[in-house]
Image: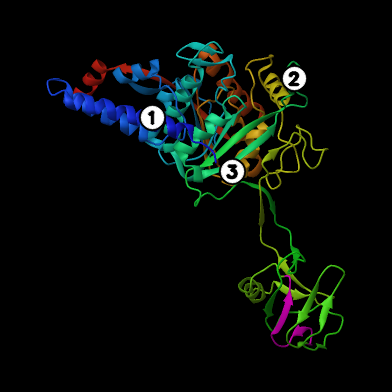
Amino acid sequence: MSTNKSREKREELLTKLEQIRNFIASSSQNPDRDGLLDALMEIEEDINGRKFGLVYEEHREKIEDILATHRAVLVEDEAAAVCNGGEDNLLIEGDNLAALQLLEEDYRGKVDVIYIDPPYNTKNKDFVYDDTFVDAGDSFRHSKWVSFMKKRLQLAAGLLADGGVIFISIDDNEQATLRFICDELFGEENFVSQLVWEKKRKGSFLSNSITNIKEYILVYTNNIKRFTGLVGQVTRKRETYPCINAVNKRDIRRIPAGVPSNYKDKDYFLPTGAIISDKTMNMVLHSDLIISGGVLEKDVLIEGNWRYAQEALDEFASKDELYLTRDLYLRRIVDHPRFKMLKDLLSRVGEDPERTYRTAIDPEDLFVCGWGTNEDADEELRQILGRQKSFNYPKPVRLLEKLVASVRRADALCLDFFAGSGTLGHAVMKLNQLDGGKRKFILCTSNENNICREVTWERLKRVIGQENYEASLKYYRVEYETEEVTKIDEKN
């Protein structure tokens, strides 16, 4: 039998607390007795409280201090607007905590798709907290990251539409931590998947332990009952499917009169007890089978390994979607769209190896081509901006284009509040041009090292012109007004 060490420790602490309580209670002359007894009660409640989940030190950021004394506002830079018809999209320069709070006013419950690629907290100074890089020597490295992410994801959760979806890129450093955060904020029952993306053609051989060629994309919704899933393939052509599957449980089904027959004889009779068989399966008649004029003359009871329930077979027959084959088996005709869900492995090479990264995706079949790599993303950004290493570790457009396509919402409002090089905006416009969609995007990013103006905005502006995307872009900055200014405005 396993021993719950945590429980034993709690019980030991509670015993000691009881001893302290008795001592305090007996000290009638102690003026702080009542306050100390209340404090003990709070400690007891904390010890007995729920312990499963993240335990971390919460940190207050400089931006929170600013927001406590200033009012954040969005100010448009009209000179940076890009107008080419189509949908109006937004690029917001500024701290994303402030930006998310501002977006709450107009977009709460309205965002269909969120994608973010946050800092991975790799110990290699990829994570900036309060204008300072967090490295391996910071003893609060994980707590700072959890505190930083939780505040932003909590706001993001409020922006999601009912049944909306959030995709979060992450690697091994904080993947487990992120699952805990998202389970708490979105609900464990709303976890959709942990996608694995093959990010490299070949991994780095500098590691002494293992060659890493993958990252994860955590997927959550806010209402699993309203979430329609991620679709990898849509089949529209007319096909037929067998109604018998040898591995299924045997049962008896009634096949209604009027079902057409492709048997060689237009008029045919098989008595009760007859067996219809091939090498892998058989059906047994529990009533006479009578074909007259190429159709089933009356209902027939057949024992077999059925794929479908009786109600489904009745529905298929009523819609003329059921028929007897030349071998007297039953098949179903299907000519409406069928959806195959996305696979959780996003591989570098698709089912058709001839479909390279330069080949356009097929929104109806996301399996046919690969999902792009880090190398593809670097080259893509270099060609757009005309210079090397404009941004570290951008994501390939194809990855985000296919994620957005899998949601199957042609009018989706998409948000990225760690926008970086602007890949999500590029992907949304590219997909709209491909399938005629009316999706819109909102991107938020800081202007650290002039990233927002020189990379994000520059990229979006250039691809709109180069690819003639029917899309427009508005540029806003987060600015802060003091309380004094706010009060003057209110008086006016």
- Whichever of labels 2 and 3 marks the residue nearer the N terminus, that label is 2
Can residue 12 be seen in this snapshot? yes
Image-quadrant location for residue 377: top right
Q: Nearer the viewer, mark 1 or mark 2?
A: 1
Question: Circle 1 sits in a helix, a strand or a loop, which is it?
Answer: helix
Query: Residue at (36%, 20%) from the top-left corner?
Result: 64
Number of other residues with Cα within 10 Å of mark 3, as a class: few under 14, some 14 to 19, many 20 or more: some
298 vs 91: above or below: below
Q: How is the image coloured?
A: rainbow
Question: Circle 3 sits in a helix, a strand or a loop, which is it?
Answer: loop
Residue position for label 2: 204
Query: Residue at (49%, 10%) from the top-left corner?
Result: 132
CB under 8 Å between discs 1 and 3? no
Q: Amino acid at mark 1?
A: Glu
Q: Amino acid at mark 3?
A: Gly
Residue position for label 3: 437
Magenta run includes residue 459: no
Left/right placement of residue 102 relative to residue 135 reads: left
Image-quadrant location for residue 191: top right
Q: Amino acid at mark 2?
A: Ser
- Whichever of labels 1 and 2 marks the residue nearer the N terminus, that label is 1
Residue position for label 1: 12
Magenta run includes residue 300: yes
In the image, which residues are magenta? 291-305
How far apart in space, not on screen, are marks 1 and 3 (Cα)?
A: 63 Å
How far apart in space, not on screen, are marks 1 and 2 (Cα)?
A: 49 Å
- Whichever of labels 1 and 3 marks the residue nearer the N terminus, that label is 1
Number of other residues with Cα within 10 Å of mark 1, as a class: few under 14, some 14 to 19, many 20 or more: few
Residue 159, position as x, y percentages in the image: 43, 37
